[in-house]
Image: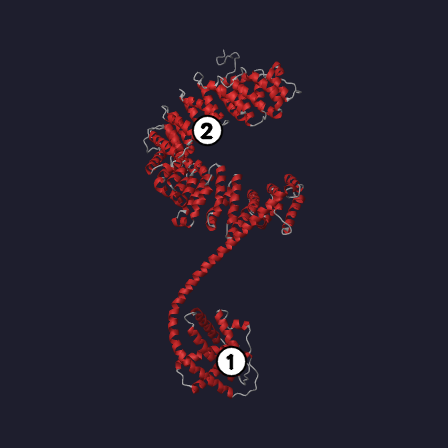
Amino acid sequence: MFPGRMTLSPPGPPCGPPEELQELAFIERPIRRSLKTAEEIDQLTVDEDLNDVERAVYLLSVGQEVQRASVISNLPSLVRQNPAETFRRVVPKVREVLNGAGAEIQLAAATSFLTILQDDIILIHTHTYSILKTVLLHLNHRDAVVSSAWLETLLSAINALPKETIKQEVLNPLLYQSQLSHSVQARLAACRILGKASCKFDSLIVKKELLPLARSLCRDVESEVRVCMCHHLESMARTIGVDDTRAELLPELLELAGDEESSVRLAAFDSIISLMEMMDGDDRLHLLVPLVMSACDASSQVDEGVMVSLSFQFGKLCSGLAGFLSDEQKRLLLQKFQVLCITGLPTEENRMDVSESTLIRCNCCYNLPAMVAFVDPSHFLSDLYPPFSSLCSDPEVSVRRSVAASFHQVVKLLGSNVHVIHKELLLLLQDSALEVLDALMNHLDEILEVVLSRGDNLMLDNKLPELLSALLSAEQQVGSSLRWRLHEKLLHRYSCLSRLLPGELLHQTFSARIFIILTTNKVLPVQKEAARTFCTFLRYNRKQEQRQEMMERLIQDLAQGRSYWNRLRFLDVCEIATEIFSRKYFNKHFLIPALELVDDPVANVRYKLCQLLPWLRSSLRLPADKLLLQKLDFCVQKFLCREKDKDVVAMIRKVTLARNQFGPGTSQFHMRHEWDLLDQKKEKEEMLLLEMEQLERQQNDGKLGSDKHMERKRRDSKTSLSSTKSMSVSSSTGSSSSGKEMRKAKLSRSRSLSSQPTSSKPMNSDRPLKAKDLGSSSGLGKATRDDLVRTHFTLTTQSTSSMPVLIRSKTTSLLDQASMLEQRDHRTSTLDHKTSNRDHRNNMMEHRTSSLEEREHRTSTPEHRDHRTSTLGQRSKTMERGCGMKDSQSRKLSVNRKSSSFQSERD
C-alpha cells in the first residue's frame, strides 16, 4: 500500500571505526582508585618513629625487593650520617640480602660500596675489611656484568686496604684463580688485580711473588688473557725499576711482540712504546728501532690494528728515537707518516674500512706537532707541508676538526715560517662545517698572535686583507647559524685583535661589525660578549677621533635609541664597562647617560637601572665625584617620589635599604681594597695609552716636518750653487775697496761734524734699544740667533758712540748716521763673505730680512720719502766730491743707505 515506506531495522551496536569503539570501551571500564591493594599498602607502611638506621634494618628484613634496592642504594648517605651504627647493623643485613639476590640488587650493592670507598667516607680499616669480605664473596658471579662491577669495587678497595690485608685476603686466593683450571673471566680478573696490587708493594715483593704469576699469565693459552696481562705489565715495570725491567720484562714483551695473534702483538707494541722512557740508548737503538721499523713494514700489509696503533704512537716514537736514527731511517719514517696521512682517501687503492682509515688520519693530525719538531721547522715546507695540506682539505669533517684542534701548536713551532700555512688557515676559517670552526676557535687568539706578529710582512705579502676577510666570513657563517655558544666563543676570541691590529684598521673592519651584532642579535649572551669586545676595542684604540665616534654611537644608538631593547643593552654595556675601564673613564663617559634613563617611559629600563645603582655608586670617590654623587642621589629621589611601577618600587626600596647603601658590605672590605688596586692599574694603563697616542702624533708630525725640511733643503741646495758663485766674485772686489770706503766715510763725517754748532738736544734714536725693539727690528721674528747677537752688538756700539754728539738739524744728523751705517755695513758684509761657506742658511735668512725691510721701506709715508731723498742727495754730492766711484759701486751703496736710513728712522 505504501511502497515507498522504509522498514525500520532493530537497534544494533553503533557503527563507526574500531579505534573509536575501543576508546569508548576503555572509558566504560571501572576506574581503579588505587594502584595498590590495602594489604600491599600495609606491607609498605613503615612506622614514622623509626630513625634512618632502624628503618633500613626493618626494610632489609621484611621489605620488598624494591625497598631493599632503595635502602642499598642509599647506603652511602647512611654511612655519612652514622658510620658506626651502619656498619654494625645495616651492612650485615645487606650481606644477608645479597645471598641469592638478583642482578639489580647486586649492581646496586657494588655501586654503593664503590661510592663509599672512592669518597673516603670511612676512616677505619675494619669497615673496609667488612666490605672486602662482601666483595670477594660475589667476585665470581655467574653474570659477567655483575662480576665486572664487583671487580671494580675490589680494585678501589685495594687503595684503602693495608698491605697485610691485601696479601692475605687478595693475593693468596689470586694464586689459585690464575690457574688454567679456572674460567677465562677469573684469569682476566687476576691480571687486573696484579697490575693494581703491584703499586702497593715494594720492588722486592713484586719481583719475588707477583712477577712469576704475571709471567705465567703472559703465556696463557687464551690470547685475551695475554693481551690483558700485556696492558698491566707497565705498572709492574715502574715498580721494579729500570734494571729489573730490562732483565725480566723486556724479553717477555719482545716475545709477545712476535705472537701469532695480531691483538697480542699490538698490545705488546703499545707496552714497549710506553716503557721507552725507561730504556737507555742501547736498548732504544738495538731493541726499539728494529721493532718500530718492522712494525712500519708490517703496517704496509694492511694490518689495521697495527696501523691504527702506529698512527697514534708515531709522534712519541719519532720524538724518543730522534737521536738514534740514521738519515735513511728518518726518511723512511717520514715516508711512512706521509702514507698514513692519506690512508683511505679516494686517490689511494686501499681496502681498509672507512672508519679505520678515518681514525688513522685523525691520529696523524694528533701527531702533527711532534712531527714538526722531528723534522725541524726549517724543513717543514719540503717534508711535511704536502701531508699537512692534505689533512686540512680532507673530505671527512672529523679529520679537519682534528687538524684544527692542533693547528695552534703547529703555528707556534713554525714561528717566523708561519706564512707557509697561511692558505690552510684561510681554508679552516672558511670551512663549511661548524665543528671545524669550533675546534679552531678554542685557540684562535694564540694563532692570531703568532700570525699577526709578522706585522709589515703581512701587508707586503697582501695576506692581511685575506685573513681579515676570512675572519669576518667566519663570524657571518657562525652568526647565521643557531650555534650561539660558538658565536659567543668567536666574539670572545676576536677581542685579542685590539692588541694585534693597528687601531685604524681595526676600527674600519671589525668595530662596525661588532656594533651591528650588539644592536641586532637577539641572543643575550652573544649581545653581552659583543659589548665586551666593543668596549675592549674602545679601550685600546689610540685615536681620539675614533674613540669619540665610538662613544657617540653608543650614546645615540643605544642610550638614546628609540627601542627600549637598545636602551637595555646600553645598561648591559655600562655593567661591562665597569670591569674594563677605570672609574675615572667610566664616570666621564658612561655614568651621566646611564642616569638620564631614570625618566625612561619603559619600566624594564628603569628596573635595570635600579639594579645597576650599587655598581654606579661604587664607582664614585669623594670629594672628586661630589657632583656626580649629587646627580645619583637626585636620581634615587626621583625613583622614590615619582615611580609608579610596583616592581621598580620594590627594587629601589631593596637597593636603598641594603647594607652600606649602594655598595658592598663592610665584610667585603678586603675586596674593596683589591678593587682599588685594580682600578689604579687600569688608570695607569689608560694614561700609558694616552701617552702612546701623543707620541705617535709627535712622530707623525716629525715625519711630516722632516719631509718638508728635506724638500726645503733640496731647494736651498739648488739655489746655493748660484749664490756661492756670485758671493765669491763680490768678496774679491769688496775686500779691495773696503779700505778706501772706510777712509772716505771717516773724512765725510769729520767734515760734517766740524761745520755743526755744539748746542742741540740728543736724538731719541741714540738711546739704547729694548729687547722688544730688538725683536721688532730683526725682520718680524724670523732672524736667527746669530742675527740677534749681531744686531745687538751693532746697536750697542752705535748708541755708545753717538751719545756725546750734539747735532742741530735732522738733515746733518741723518747724514752722519748714514756714514756710520755705511761703515758698519761694510764690516758686516766682509764678515758674511768670510763665513758664507759655513753658515749659508744664516745668509739666506739675512737676505730675506733685508728684502722685508725694503718692502716696509717702500710702504713708508711720503714725508719720510722726501726727507730720505734729500738726505741721499746730499750724501751723493759729498761722495762725488770725495772720490770718483764707479756707477756700479754707487748703486750698491745706495741700496745699503736705503736700508740703514730706514732703520734709523724706525729707531
- Is residue 195 visible in this depiction of the protein? no
- Is residue 762 visible in this depiction of the protein? yes
Along the polypeptide, which appears first: circle 2 or circle 1? 2
Foreground: 751 or 312?
Answer: 312
Residue identifier under label 1: 863
Q: Which residue is drawn at 46% across and 37% down?
A: 481
User: Judging from the image, what secondary structure is the residue with disc 2 in?
Assistant: helix
Q: Where is residue 580? Give x, y as percent.
A: 55, 46
The kind of residue on which mark 1 rests is: Glu
Quadrant of res 90: top right
Q: Which residue is drawn at 43% across and 60% down?
A: 707
The kind of residue on which mark 2 rests is: Ile
Q: Where is residue 251? Give x, y as percent.
A: 39, 27
Q: How crowded is mark 2: few (under 14 residues within 10 Å), some or many (20 or more)?
A: many
- As drawn, the label of residue 240 is 2
Q: How crowded is mark 1: few (under 14 residues within 10 Å), some or many (20 or more)?
A: few
Quadrant of res 839: bottom left
